[in-house]
Image (cartoon, helix red, strand yellow):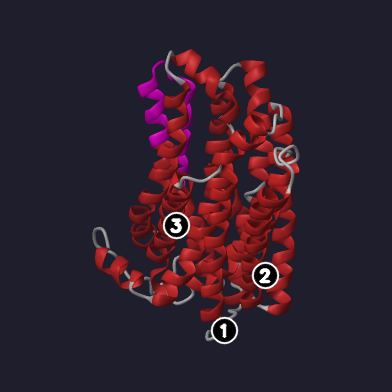
Amino acid sequence: MQKFLLLLLSIVLLGPLGIDLYLPTIPAIAEGLGTPQSVIQATISLFILVLGAGQLVAGPLVDNYGRKPVALAGIALYLAGAVVAALAVSPAMFIASRLIQGVAVCCTAVVAFTGVRDRLNGEDAARAFGFLNGTLNIVPALAPLLGGLLAEAFGWRAPFWFLGGYAVAVFILIALLMPETRPADTVPVRGLPLRQYGAILRDRRFVTFALVNAGAMGMALTYVSLAPTVLMGDGGLSPLHFSLAFGANGFWILLVSVIANRVIHKMGRPLCLAIGSVLMLVGAAGLALGMALLPATVQPQWWVYMLPVAAACAGLAFMMGPATSYALEPYGSEAGVASALVGFVQMAGGSVLGLAAMALPLAPKLSLAVMMLAGCLLALRARRLSKTLRGQITSLKSDA
């Protein structure tokens, strides 16, 4: 099972690598293509939008055609998108490359989370989802530095050639080693399964736990979006020091994810949801109290922002694995459709919540505190529901 999870991790990493690796090169890309930086920055939002909405289409595909074929098709598309970006000679060509890679990651993301649901249930599934979500945080910690070094040595196109090489390596691994996990009783899907999506969205259990992930994603997007303004604009950090603070938080979430998986195993998912909600509340209170009580000369310092963020990000690590497993647990025969819907709610819901928080007429720190409070309340609601549920632990199937 460990080998299987590592294979899933290799395809899950395609998403964050496709965003974080080229962040330091945005000014160089804009200059090289003769376009404003805002155009290149907008491709990040475009990527996330396609990733969220496209999963609604990718879900039926993995149920109809199997996990492995869709994964291979997605990786091939990802490779094509990387090559188009590396060879781009116009803004339109670069934007097209991001659209292609966004569609590709829709496929691989749904395959990864569907694969966990195929093999595991209950606490084991929660630990697997926590492992995948937690390990992803090493990418924001290291990818911008790697992308910057590649660009400095070989130019802004180099990170995209790196993505292409990674896609080739993952394609070979998946083709040779990944088993097909689609259950024999999987419900076939004809066209876009609007009725199935509607039925799942009417399930109070599914919506309650999926919204936990939306709240966590909204908090993360708000933090990432506001961090440059708060830390470099107000706090005066250099780009290097900003990268170090940003990266350290990624490693922190990875560490907390390991702890959360042990807590799930020893004490269960409801406790993890409770811990996550408390940590979100601590983060919100830390930001608000820091603004209310600390002297104006101290408030711009990086730790006034990053310590509450660290608490809330730890809450995210405790919440997302249990919430995902609870949401998908009843849908073993339509795991692809349900996994796609979880991804859509997480991405689209998180984007809406994050944009709403940032649109409030508040200081950046207070906007983030509001988003943390929303995440806390959503997790508490899920915690109450989880006390009435009993998960199942299935025996692990062989990788053969």
Which of the 4 image quarters holds residue 235?
Answer: top right
Q: Nearer the viewer, mark 1 or mark 3?
A: 1
User: At x 26% / y 63%, what residue is drawn?
Assistant: 194
Q: Position of residue 199 (x, y in %)?
A: 30, 72
- Label 2 environment density (alpha carbons within 10 Å; few <14, some 14–19, many ≥20): many
How far separated are the C-alphas under marks 2 and 3?
23 Å
Which of the 4 image quarters holds residue 73?
Answer: top left
Element type where label 2 sits in the image:
helix
Say which of 346 and 18 sits in front.
Answer: 346
How far separated are the C-alphas under marks 1 and 2?
14 Å
Closer to the chain start, of discs 1 and 3, is: 3
- Label 3 environment density (alpha carbons within 10 Å; few <14, some 14–19, many ≥20): many
Closer to the chain start, of discs 1 and 2, is: 2
Say which of 325 and 69 sits in front.
Answer: 325
Element type where label 1 sits in the image:
loop
Q: Which residue is mark 1?
A: 387
Do we see residue 85 in this rendering? yes
How far separated are the C-alphas under marks 1 and 3?
24 Å
Principal secondary structure, stretch drawn in magenta: helix
- Amino acid of disc 1: Lys
Q: Does the magenta-highlighted stretch encompass residue 123?
A: no
Q: Position of residue 127 (x, y in %)?
A: 64, 67
Q: Which mark is residue 264?
A: none
Q: Does the magenta-highlighted stretch encompass residue 98?
A: yes
Q: Which residue is mark 3?
A: 343
User: At x 40% / y 76%, what residue is drawn?
Assistant: 204
Q: Which residues are magenta?
A: 70-99
User: At x 53% / y 68%, what residue is drawn?
Assistant: 377
Q: Which residue is mark 2?
A: 275
- Amino acid of disc 3: Gly
